[in-house]
Image (cartoon, rainbow, N blue to C red):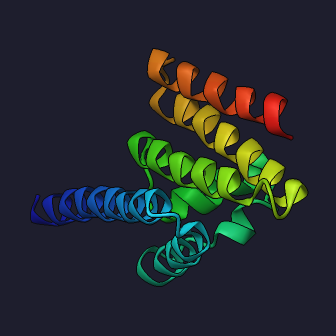
């Protein structure tokens, strides 16, 4: 029982860390420091959560699901990670459209995986996917 509570606490902490990383990214982006925000986000995800954004973008869907499962990420965590990827992708559109497209497409895939993990379809996730698809259509 105590071990289960410890795991639950760690999963909750993971969500808080992800939310904090996203908040910092958005804060730096709003100050016009997009490159610094992307770099800091990549470093924090790798250093604090062992999540490699560059690796994520190269994995197949099955490999990605295994990668995320090994890190105990839940659907709500994937939504935050997807938001990070979306913001990173949007920030890279001007300098590297190919990389930006990969990140935006992977953000959609993360939301698809969140649907699979939770075994539910969320209107919020559907709207997030549409928003990312609009960015892809309009800017890439």
Q: Is residue 105 above or below residue 87?
A: above
- Label count reads 0
Residue 119 x, y percent position in the rendering: 49, 24
Residue 34 image-quadrant placement:
bottom right
Residue 108, position in %: x, y?
Answer: 67, 37
Asked if residue 42 lies left or right of residue 4, the reply is right
The residue shown at (65%, 67%) is: 53
Q: Quadrant of the C terminus?
A: top right
Instruction: Report the front residue among 11 and 38.
Output: 38
Classify residue 14 by image quadrant. Answer: bottom left
Image point 53% across, 54% down: which residue?
84
Quarter placement of the N terminus: bottom left
Residue, far right: 98
For image coordinates 51% across by 77% down, the residue present is 50
Q: Position of residue 101 (x, y in %)?
A: 82, 48
Residue at the limit of the structure toward the front, as seen here: 32
Tell me what residue is drawn at x 51 percent, y 26 percent: 125
| In the image, residue 95 above or below residue 35 | above
Residue 103 image offset from top left, x and y in percent:
73, 53
Closer to the camera, 65 or 50?
50
The quarter of the picture where residue 63 lies is bottom right
Near-viewer residue (3 or 125):
125
Q: Is residue 12 above or below residue 128?
A: below
């Amino acid at each position: 029982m105590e071990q289960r509570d410890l795991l639950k606490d760690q999963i909750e902490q993971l969500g808080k860390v992800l939310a904090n990383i996203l908040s910092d990214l958005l804060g730096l982006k709003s100050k016009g420091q997009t490159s610094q925000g992307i770099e800091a986000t990549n470093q924090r995800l790798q250093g604090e959560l062992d999540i490699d954004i560059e690796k994520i973008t190269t994995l197949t869907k099955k490999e990605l699901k295994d990668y995320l499962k090994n890190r105990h990420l839940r659907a709500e965590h994937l939504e935050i990670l997807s938001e990070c990827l979306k913001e990173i992708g949007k920030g890279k559109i001007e300098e590297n459209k190919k990389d930006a497209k990969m990140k935006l497409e992977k953000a959609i895939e993360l939301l698809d995986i969140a649907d699979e993990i939770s075994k539910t379809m969320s209107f919020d996730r559907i709207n997030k996917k549409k928003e990312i698809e609009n960015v892809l259509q309009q800017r890439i």
